Image (cartoon, rainbow, N blue to C red):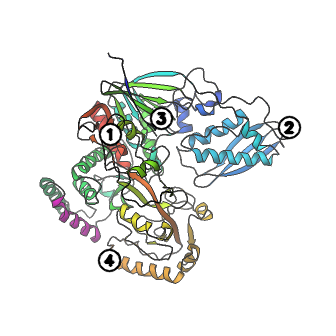
Amino acid sequence: MNEKLDTARANGSGASGASGIARSGASSAASARGITRRGFIAGAAIAGVNIALFGLSGCAPSASADGENGQFKAGTYTGIGQGKFAPITVEVTFGESSIESVNVIDHEETKYISDTALETIPAAIVEHQSLGVDTIAGATLTSTAIIAACEDCVKQAGGSASKLKGNYEKPAPSTEVVELEADIVIVGAGASGTVAAVNAARLGAKKVVVLEKSCNVGGNALVSGGYLEYVHAPEDLREKMTDNYTVELEANVAAAADIMPAADLEKLKADIEAWKASGSTKVFDSVELHALQYAIQGEGAYADMLISGQHIAELDDWLATSGFEFKPLVGIVGYSWPRWTSSVNGTCGQGYFEFYTSMIDENDYPVEIHLNTPARELISDDGTVTGVVAQGADGTTYRVSAEKGVILATGGFSGNPDMLREYNTRWDWDPKQIIPTTNAFGHTGDGIEMALALGGATAAMDTQMPFPFADCKNSTDETTVGDDIDCPIVNKEGKRFMNEVLDRFTMTEHIMAQPDQMMFMISDKDTCWIDGEVNRYGRNVENLINQGQLFRADTLEELAGLMGVDAGTFVETIEQYNEYARQGEDPDFGRTNFTEHSPIENPPFYASPRTWAMHITVGGLVVDSATDYTVIGEDGNRIEGLHAIGETTLGSCGIGVQGEGYAIAQALFG
């Protein structure tokens, strides 16, 4: 075989993951390189992974790192550092001349994303007697919060925090090159990449290597609502078919003639008639309706949306028959048709990865996931992609060759402000404006950049979808208190300014036109989605209130005062909204989608400050989605051996990209 290789270089990394090879000769026992698979499940929550946190294996200090007088005040102290969602509380025990233990005793960080930092940062501080240890890529906020809490404890114990920050010596980067071989190499361990890995192994792949840029699997699925389309859901999970849904369905069918092929339209009409004849009182759905509604909203061509919908339906059927449990269907922000579900277990998208983790472990699937190991370049041989070059956190280079080539599953570029600006044609951003994002670490367009270096074609790169209900402080959805469909939205003047169930692009345009580009999501006892002390994502409500991310009151007038809006205007706005909700028609903004819970009238009342943040990039690489998702070049030809799925590609986004992971494994190994 010709060993002359052409290398396509990219400016970013390829996955959303930590250097995952446990090698002999590791420089530090505390680097956790020898953690077994089952041990890592308990600690960092993914099966089939050997992890090496090379960034924490610094040299031990040459002198005691104790207090100014050579002594700590021996004892146990408690410190607090601000995490992403709430304070992280740390308990540190000191001897007279050393830090003896560090324990995180309370936190609200996101599971999976924070797990590695919560486990390894305290261990590294004790081992190196230093506050200068490296943070964990993908969990920087958690890492810095733990270090800040420990710094507080050091000061309480009479020690020198500045001295403890400066006595950490980072090891020299490794120059080792490791050669790996696999049936397939997947760049990115998010929703699509993980499913591709699991299904490929299930179908007989002897070795699957996954390269992940971050310290965890899951990608954006861990910080989204975790909602997946489920058109074949059983009756007991579906909502009742209301008059509003009937009107919407009729409008969709009326608009279909100019969007979908005549044969598909006739099938849709026949399916609707069969549904009516069945006597079902639950919401109608089908793959064709799913694709039609996406096309109506301008999110892609009907034919492409149909293929995507079919793959998602196949995924759903596989999950259901494999024992995965779904929640009842609902509508979500920007998508009011109630076909969206999530896992019964976990919050956000965590349940999917708990399920896939268990599948890998229970079946001993040959899936090798390397965390904190970003892909740097693609390897090609005479125009065919044959592998990937990646780099571990300690500098080790990994050259991974794969018989069936490379699958890029690196996500979009909503976390890359420069790339957003480069392709933007729609949003009027100030050049100095920070572009917030809901995205988890690592979604910076790396896979797209690598494919572009080989002549890959892209399209619709200016179609950049914001999320209109993001937290004003940390840009997440996880702090939301309020039902996405029922709740009215008001601006800082206490007035409604839009139909709350429009598409995300239009809602964002309205929000950007408001004072300070922010709004309040208003809810009451019936629509707040609060269970005990937490919201639907498990976030502590009292912490949200204490941090100014939520307001709560027993009257609308009191709530207006907390929000800083005129009470008279606000109360009049809510009362008018309630009247529209009861009659099912909104003459002010044309909204017709209301439920019996839409009126806001039962205390306590809540106001959740919200704004926009970049969420999804709809544009991406052009691929042959009808076959095996091979990337298409600018010359119109296939780039053999190079595949792409998920938000890396044109028109794909959301949890539903799991369907593409399922489909590509079927195409390559089925």
Give the mark, 3 or 1, whose residue is nearer the N terminus: 3
Task: State which region is magenta.
Answer: 242-260
Name the secondary structure under disc 1.
helix
Magenta residue check for 29: no
Magenta residue check for 257: yes
Estimate how packed mark 1 is, as few (under 14), some (14 to 19) or many (20 or more) residues with alpha carbons within 10 Å. many
- Residue 585 badge: 4
- Residue 70 badge: 2
- Residue 625 badge: none
Give the mark, 4 or 2, whose residue is nearer the N terminus: 2
Tell me whether the residue at label 1 lies in contact with that at label 4, contact meaning CB atoms closer than 8 angstroms. no
Tell me whether the residue at label 4 lies in contact with that at label 2, contact meaning CB atoms closer than 8 angstroms. no
Tell me whether the residue at label 1 lies in contact with that at label 2, contact meaning CB atoms closer than 8 angstroms. no
Name the secondary structure under disc 4.
loop
The x and y percentages for residue 569 are 49, 82
- Quarter of the image where the N terminus is located: top left
The x and y percentages for residue 390 are 46, 30
From the viewer's side, name the closer residue of 598 and 282: 598
* Foreground tag (3 vs 1): 3
Measure how far apart labels 1 and 2 are at the Cα level.
60 Å
Report the residue marked by disc 1: 662
Report the residue marked by disc 3: 374
Name the secondary structure under disc 3.
loop
Name the secondary structure under disc 2.
loop
Measure how far apart labels 4 and 2 are at the Cα level.
74 Å
From the viewer's side, name the closer residue of 38 and 556: 556
